Amino acid sequence: MTGRYIEPVNESKADPAYALEPTEASIASWLHENWRPDITLREWWARLARAGLGFPTWPENRGGRGWDRASLRILSQAFGQVGAIGGNVRRVGCSPIAVAQL
């Protein structure tokens, strides 16, 4: 086999402690508890991953939230309002297949 070896994706859901709904109030509350401009980027990405927000449109069994485009817009707006680093919340077209092709 040529090229890089990519580890298989674990069948894991976002941490159930993060009972997030795709609503402005729920996302604002989560951001209030988790976003701090002084934390490291590594810690921020870890928090996003634990909450299933690294790639929120991905299926839950792949670490996402399974949210649709409308939910993604709400999330993106909430991130913008507090100045949080949004990562992939603006990349609506990003999919697990795209990552697998890397």
Image: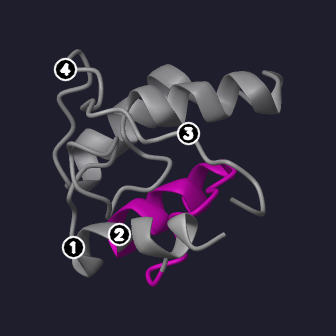
Between circles 3 and 4, the one closer to the viewer is 3
| Residue that label 3 marks | 7
| Residue that label 1 marks | 68
Mark 2, other Cα within 10 Å: few <14 / some 14–19 / many ≥20: many
Q: Which mark is residue 88?
A: none
Q: How far apart are labels 3 and 2 at the CA level?
A: 27 Å
Q: Nearer the viewer, residue 56 or 60?
A: 60
| Residue 79 makes an appearance in the image | yes
| Residue that label 4 marks | 16
The residue located at (51%, 36%) in the rendering is 48
| Residue that label 2 marks | 72
Pointer 1 with pointer 4, Cβ within 8 A: no
Residue 12 position in % (x across, y down): 27, 30
**Secondary element type, mark 2:** helix
Q: Amino acid at mark 1?
A: Asp
The residue located at (20%, 55%) in the rendering is 22
Q: Is residue 36 left or right of residue 74?
A: right
The residue located at (16%, 45%) in the rendering is 21
Q: Earlier in the sequence, mark 3 or mark 2?
A: 3
Q: Amino acid at mark 3?
A: Glu
